[in-house]
Image: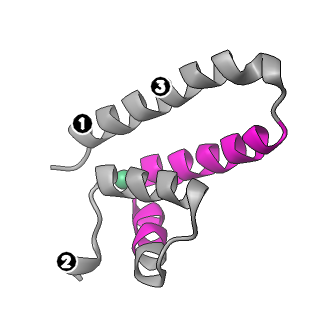
């Protein structure tokens, strides 16, 4: 059980990786399990999905704004990790 548990940082990493390529089955299960028990990462994953959908339909004028959003996502992920369950 312990081996299947991800840290919030790792979960955020998997969410990011999933934007670029499909996750290996084990990682998918780990991420799924984590988002069942961790509300913060569940929200993060949903927001990431929304952002991915947005990225697919982006227009050139929106790119600088997106950088800010991505920065905030990373900062939030790190912050969540530091203040999360210990
Ligand atoms: Zn988490």
Q: To which quarter of the image does residue 78 belong?
A: top left
Colour convention: one colour
Measured along the vertical axis of the image, is residue 6 above or below residue 39? below
Q: Depth-wise, is mark 3 or mark 1 nearer the camera?
A: 3
Label whose residue precedes the other's in the sequence (3 or 2)? 2
Task: Classify 78 as above or below 5.
Answer: above
* Residue under pointer 1: 83
Label 3: which secondary element: helix
Label 3 lies in ligand 1 vicinity (Cβ under 8 Å): no
Of marks 3 and 2, the one in the foreground: 3
The CA span between labels 2 and 1 is 20 Å
**Residue 45, magenta (yes or no):** yes
Q: Are marks 3 and 2 in contact (CB under 8 Å)?
A: no
Q: Is residue 17 above or below residue 82?
A: below
For label 1, the SS is helix
- Which residue is the site of mark 3? 71
Magenta: main secondary structure: helix
Question: Mark 2: which secondary structure?
Answer: helix
Q: Earlier in the sequence, mark 3 or mark 1?
A: 3
Q: Position of residue 76 (x, y in %)?
A: 41, 31
In the rendered image, residue 7, in percent from the top left (x then y), is placed at: 27, 57
Q: Which residues are magenta?
A: 30-57
Residue that badge 2 annotates = 2
Q: CA distance from mark 3 to mark 1?
A: 18 Å
Residue at (46%, 62%) from the top-left corner? 35
Q: Which mark is residue 67?
A: none
Q: Residues within 10 Å of mark 3 (few under 14, many from 20)?
A: few
């Amino acid at each position: 059980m312990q081996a299947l548990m991800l840290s919030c940082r790792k979960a955020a990493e998997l969410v990011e990786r999933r934007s670029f390529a499909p996750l290996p089955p084990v990682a998918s299960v780990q991420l799924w399990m984590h988002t069942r028990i961790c509300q913060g990462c569940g929200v993060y994953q949903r927001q990431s999905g929304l952002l991915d959908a947005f990225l697919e339909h982006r227009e050139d004028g929106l790119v600088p704004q997106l950088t800010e959003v991505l920065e905030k996502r990373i900062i939030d992920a790190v912050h969540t990790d530091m203040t999360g369950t210990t």
